[in-house]
Image (cartoon, rainbow, N blue to C red):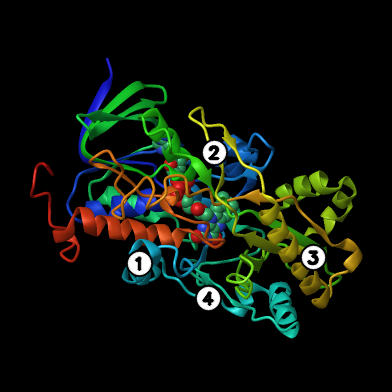
Amino acid sequence: MAERKKADYVVVGSGAGGGTITHELTKRGRKVLVLERGPDIRWVGNHAFAIAVLDKHGFLTSKEGMGVARALCTGGSSVVTCGTSSRPPKGVFEKHGIDLTPYLEEGEKQLGVTTLPDDVIGEGVLALLEAGNRLGMNWVKLQKFIDPAKCEPRFCNCMLGCAKGAKWTSRVLLDEAASMGAEVLPNVKVEEVIVQQGEATGVRAWRKGRGELVVEADRVILAAGGMGTPVILQKSGLYEAGTGFFCDPLAFTIGYHPRLKAGFAPPMTVGTFDFWDSDGFLLSPVVDPWISLALEALKAKPSRILYWPQYPRTMGIMTKAKDELAGRISIDETFSKQLTHRDQSVLDKGGSIARKVLIEAGCDPTTIWTTKARGAHPGGTVRIGEMLDTDLQTEIKGLYVCDASVIPDSLAAPVVLTLVALAKRLADHLEPTGASAGNQGHKEKTLR
Ligand SMILES: Cc1cc2nc3c(=O)[nH]c(=O)nc-3n(C[C@H](O)[C@H](O)[C@H](O)COP(=O)(O)OP(=O)(O)OC[C@H]3O[C@@H](n4cnc5c(N)ncnc54)[C@H](O)[C@@H]3O)c2cc1C
């Protein structure tokens, strides 16, 4: 016999989208149940954590061999971000009549968005910023959701999780929501949405070690991420989901400096948006965590591994590109994605400018190489204006999506703040009376 549960809202997935909508609806007095496929591992901040939570232990690849990273755990990929914040490019939402401005402002306050002081950024990365500016570009400090007072960048890397609790993750919101009455169940994989007479009435899931779980809810919110949500939708009969997607492909151009240290500096603390509108890429210093860098070096050219012992003096500049909506997520969770000629030429242009900046900063030109491209922001698989209305509702009444799937076009930029804003806007739509009133208690028993 299946285990059964009831809630006002069932939220599937606990990343930036799922965590924020859970927090907002719980604050408004609703009974929210969160089902998260991954475990709730709290020993963050090391390679073992990253290997445990990254899908396929960090080796998730498309049928064509392109790597894409996503974390499957409470907090989703928000746990492994670089902690960088950015508003979406102008026009992406405006052309659908959506103004996110007030929600972005609220999100920035909630995430404590700020720039980091020079001593946290480090001399190596500041040398890259100065080099970029000497070459006539506008390099600036980037916005971070990292508390500078707690950040101790010695031998850590934000992408392995932050052991100091300096970086915002959606776990902050999940924990707060749980203290207000939300229930968060890890290790529960949702298979499909239950639909009766065209209306979503709950979900059917599989609970690790326990068996089938059926949840009855007034509304269902899918927040299983750009790769998880389209699979659930296809299993629920919406077969167009997952057709075409972006992943903001990125490549690191790496060099070695004779003196300055940037290997252990926090990633993406500075950068330039100069080429964002004209060419569709962002440049920002990032170096892979040391084990990943060894693997990337081996993949690119085995002799590159000889530089690995010089990790502390490694300098890296990431080109993050806007890619075309191509490829497909399949119902069996495999996916097809490869760079188009246009995507590759955008990355190549970014790589050649990154190389000039590294040389200007003093890196030995003979040591410079570029990693293979991979993606870290899967999204655009259930796009607003195609499969969703502007309130993020699907054609099935009561079934909403609140994650990177909904973003209509590649951002080539950090995604988290946009998802926080979208979730806040969705909460205002679903529970308008609670928006300004905060915790009102659960007054209505049913929503329909
Ligand atoms: C290494 C790395 C660095 C990044 N750095 C930044 C950065 O600095 N700034 C930034 O803004 N963004 C960054 N990003 C991107 C950002 O983390 C993601 O785009 C964003 O967190 C996606 O949020 P989401 O809510 O769409 O989905 P996710 O975070 O993917 O959350 C989805 C959740 O749903 C769960 N799930 C999936 N399927 C099911 C199912 N069937 N049943 C139940 N649960 C399910 C997953 O386990 C996961 O926890 C980075 C990403 C990576 C990988």
> Residue at point 27% right, 38% down?
396
- Marks 2 & 3, CB-CB < 8 Å contact: no
> Residue at point 25% right, 30% down?
195
Of callouts 1 and 3, the N-terminal one: 1
Calculate the distance from the C-alpha at mark 4 to the C-alpha at mark 2. Answer: 37 Å
Checking the image for residue 406, the label placed there is: none
Checking the image for residue 313, the label placed there is: 3
> Residue at point 26% right, 45% down?
182
Q: In the rendered view of the protein, which quadrant contains the C terminus?
A: top left
Q: Residues within 10 Å of mark 4 (few under 14, many from 20)?
A: many
Calculate the distance from the C-alpha at mark 1 to the C-alpha at mark 4. Answer: 22 Å
Calculate the distance from the C-alpha at mark 2 to the C-alpha at mark 3. Answer: 39 Å
Label 2 SS: strand
Of callouts 3 and 4, the N-terminal one: 4
Q: Nearer the viewer, mark 4 or mark 2?
A: 2
Question: Would residue 104 be visible to someone looking at this image?
Answer: yes
Report the residue marked by disc 4: 115
Q: Residues within 10 Å of mark 3 (few under 14, many from 20)?
A: many
Amino acid marked by disc 4: Thr
Amino acid marked by disc 1: Leu
Of callouts 2 and 3, the N-terminal one: 3
Q: In the rendered view of the protein, which quadrant contains the N terminus?
A: top left
Checking the image for residue 328, the label placed there is: 2
Point out residue 193 in the picture as x, y percentages from the top left corner. Answer: 31, 31
Checking the image for residue 100, the label placed there is: 1
Q: Is residue 199 above or below residue 392?
A: above
- Marks 1 & 4, CB-CB < 8 Å contact: no
Left or right of 64? Residue 8 is left
